[in-house]
Amino acid sequence: MDNTELLRFTTAGSVDDGKSTLIGRLLYDTKLIMEDQLEALQRSSDITGDGQINLANLTDGLRAEREQGITIDVAYRYFATPKRKFIVADTPGHVQYTRNMVTGASTANLAIILVDARQGVIQQTRRHAYIASLLRIPHVVICINKMDLVAYSEDIFNQIREDFVNFAAGLGIRDLTFIPISALHGDNIVDKSENLPWYFGPPLLRHLEDVYIGNDRNLQDARFPVQYVIRPYKDEFHDFRGFAGQIAGGFFRKGDPVTILPSGKTSTITQIHTHDGELDEAFAPMSVTLQIADDIDISRGDMIVKRDNIPHVAQEFEAMVCWMVDEPMRKGGKYGIKLGTRSARAMPMDILHRINIDTLEPETGVTGLALNEIGRVKFKTTVPMIFDPYNRNRYTGGFILIDEATNITVGAGMICEPKRIVPGTEDTAEFII
């Protein structure tokens, strides 16, 4: 399984739409539940007297979650099939846990949004779809659940699909799939259901196994954030100096002309090393050590890029921010910022607008962002940051804000597309999403 491809996916949906039950069903039907876990579930079912195994308890690990029948924290589960390995994040549906959903979905290749077939597309469905689009999750699967409670109606499925497509037209979701399911009874989860003869697509697990994620990473813009400088020895016979990190985009080959940012100095790649030996080329998301031809001062936080493909370098930028703590963000506040391997201090110069989480419309004239609120903020940093717009590269366009007194992460940000930006100047006033 070491060479099997990994898919990260997240689940979202309104309260009691069946997110945890769906994940439990996936684990149960693929025979991936340990015997002691199954015995504990059976004992729990006996206590409740409902006569069925409560599959949601596989992911709702907190006592408060089990008592209320809801998901509060993000629960991560790992499983595998012969085709692919999976990491699934079961995220909360409540609006007051928006930060948890952002956390669980930030690294996902795919999002599963559950819709109750009896309720159709509701406000929380639209909110979760908006967050999935904001986080640029490449693949979205709309699982219309509880089809057993609407007599497996094709008309209801088609109506919900039409409603969602009309709403999502402006969200820019690249890959959108609809699957009718019943998580409780296992319809269309692992095997195709005889109760849904009108549905000709794959069941959910087969879709998860087959969805193509090879193009999810940006393979056009070569980006190598330096994480560590390796200098194990230096004497008259040896002078090894390498730069270690994970490639965040594109690919690098021996002989490639490169630029080191933010200094702007240029050189050429001479060698590419990995734990298994030397390579002629490497690509995202490989972890490698690069050697260059010239002796240039490079340290953690710098970035090695192709000479003809330069990212933005600026101390001012705009970003969409999800605020994650009780103490609100204020204009003029001071925070630590971490973008890739680069750290600095950042100040919100202006809060341009806040997203109304119910209507998804921007609200201007706000002075701060409270817990779980999302807004567009203009920042200024103490040193130049090296970035791409988040919609082009999630790994070089996403950052976190840190309370330097407590070292707690207080916000997560996604940099917006600049219309015009000149490295080395403060001409960063115009931005587009």
Image (cartoon, rainbow, N blue to C red):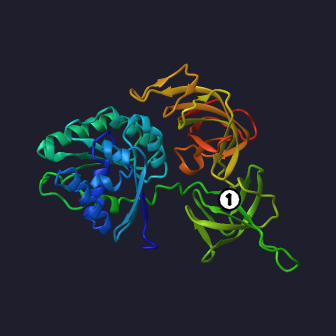
Q: Is residue 182 left or right of residue 416?
A: left
Residue at the spot x=36%, y=59% of the render?
Answer: 211
Which x, y percent locates residue 71? 36, 45
Q: Can residue 156 be seen at all in this image of the molecule?
A: yes
For this orientation, the residue located farthest to the right is 236
Q: In this view, does 340 lie to the left or right of 205?
A: right
Residue at the spot x=29%, y=59% of the render?
Answer: 26
The N terminus, quarter of image: bottom left
Q: Is residue 420 left or right of residue 169?
A: right
Rendered image quadrant of residue 27:
bottom left
Residue at the spot x=72%, y=53% of the render?
Answer: 302
Q: Is residue 366 above or below residue 253?
A: above
Q: Is residue 115 above or below residue 285?
A: above
- Taking depth in this image into account, of 323 and 253 the one nearest to the observer is 323
| Circle count | 1
Residue underneath mark 1: 227
For this orientation, the residue located farthest to the front is 47
Rendered image quadrant of residue 5:
bottom left
Q: Can residue 188 be seen at all in this image of the molecule?
A: no
Which x, y percent locates residue 400? 59, 44
Q: Is mark 1 on a helix, strand or loop?
A: loop
Which x, y percent locates residue 202? 24, 58
Which x, y percent locates residue 103? 49, 46
Q: Is residue 56 left or right of residue 262?
A: left
Q: Residues within 10 Å of mark 1 (few under 14, many from 20)?
A: some
For this orientation, the residue located farthest to the bottom is 237
Q: Which amino acid does label 1 sit on?
A: Gln
Residue at the spot x=69%, y=67% of the render?
Answer: 290
